[in-house]
Amino acid sequence: MKSKQPLLALLLSIGILIVPLTGTARDVQLRDRPGNENEAPPPAMAKPAPTVDTASMSIKERIRRLERLLQSQGLVSLMVHQQELQKELEQLRGDIEVQTNNLAELKKRQRELYVDIDRRLLAVERNGGSRAPAQAPASTTSAPVTATQARPSTTTASAGQTQDEQQSYQKAFDLLRALRYDKAIQAFRDFIRQFPNGRYAHIAQYWVAEANYAQRRFADAIVDYQALLDHYPNSPKLAEAMLKIGYSQFELKQFDKARDSLGRLIKAYPGTTEAGQGQNLLQKIKVQQSTTP
């Protein structure tokens, strides 16, 4: 018995020494591992997002939560809609600018067209295209007057009338060139009443019809073009007046009347530009009537 106690004490001491040495060797082994000194500790696991327990929420809290969700979604959709409206507004502004430029260019070309037509008509007048105003017969009871005595007064009166006529016509035409159609129509009508047999009377009647046509007053334009045909048979604008009557009747969908007017135009002025345009309009009327139920 006494011999076993020293042996047990020895074993216990050996065990106590082994355990610390084993732990120390392990620590040394971990410290001496290459790259271990810079190795970051393992990352902590991400915490899961908190979940909303809607079952434990009251009805009011649920309603408030839904309202907040709807408001956030509504703000997003409102912002998207606002951006779309902004893009549409910018596009409309660009379209308006383009149309404004086109309108200004159209007005400029229309003024140039009026001036060119007026210049051509006046050139025709200077070449003898107008009718001379009617002269009142001389009284047989009046005293004889020599040619030398009569010429100065006649020339003076004719020159004064011509100047008044030109000024009155130019005033009306300036209104038309400025695209002030209603005032131009009234001024040309006053001119015709003042100078019914003047050399510019038929041109004034033509411009009255053109001003109505430009404003798409087709019924009034037909009446005024027809007045040109009836009262001024020597006007160089008869063919165009007949063509514009056909166009006006076409715009009013009076296709049968338009065919008759264009037929008279082609018969009266064959081979002219107006007759060719009349043929084209007849084809358009034919297509229009064939597609109309």
Image: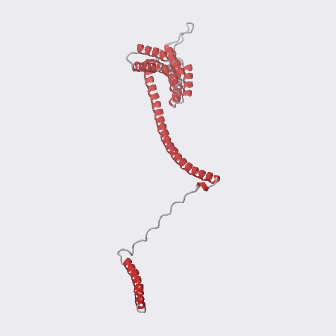
Q: Nearer the viewer, residue 93 or 117?
A: 93
In the image, residue 149 lies at what x, y percent?
A: 51, 15
- Vertical position of residue 92 compared to residue 286: above or below: below
Q: Residue furthest left?
A: 34
Q: Nearer the viewer, residue 264 or 118?
A: 264
Where does the N terminus fall, quadrant-wise?
bottom left
In this view, 173 is above or below 35: above
Depth check, front residue: 132 or 290: 290
> Can you give x and y, in whole percent of width and height, for residue 3 in the image?
40, 92
Please name the residue shown 51% across and 43% down the image. 89
| Furthest residue in direction bottom, as rendered | 2
Q: Is residue 81 visible?
A: yes
Q: Which is more toward the observer, 186 or 280?
A: 280
* Residue 166 against residue 69 in the figure, above or below: above
Q: Is residue 234 visible?
A: no
In percent of width and height, residue 93 lies at: 50, 42
Residue 202's x, y, as percent? 49, 19
Name, please, the residue furthest toward the front: 1
In which quadrant of the rendered view does residue 219 lie? top right
Identify the image's colour scheme: rainbow, by chain, secondary structure or one colour: secondary structure
Q: Residue at point 50% right, 30% down?
A: 177
Which residue is drawn at the image coordinates 57% and 24% (left, top)?
186
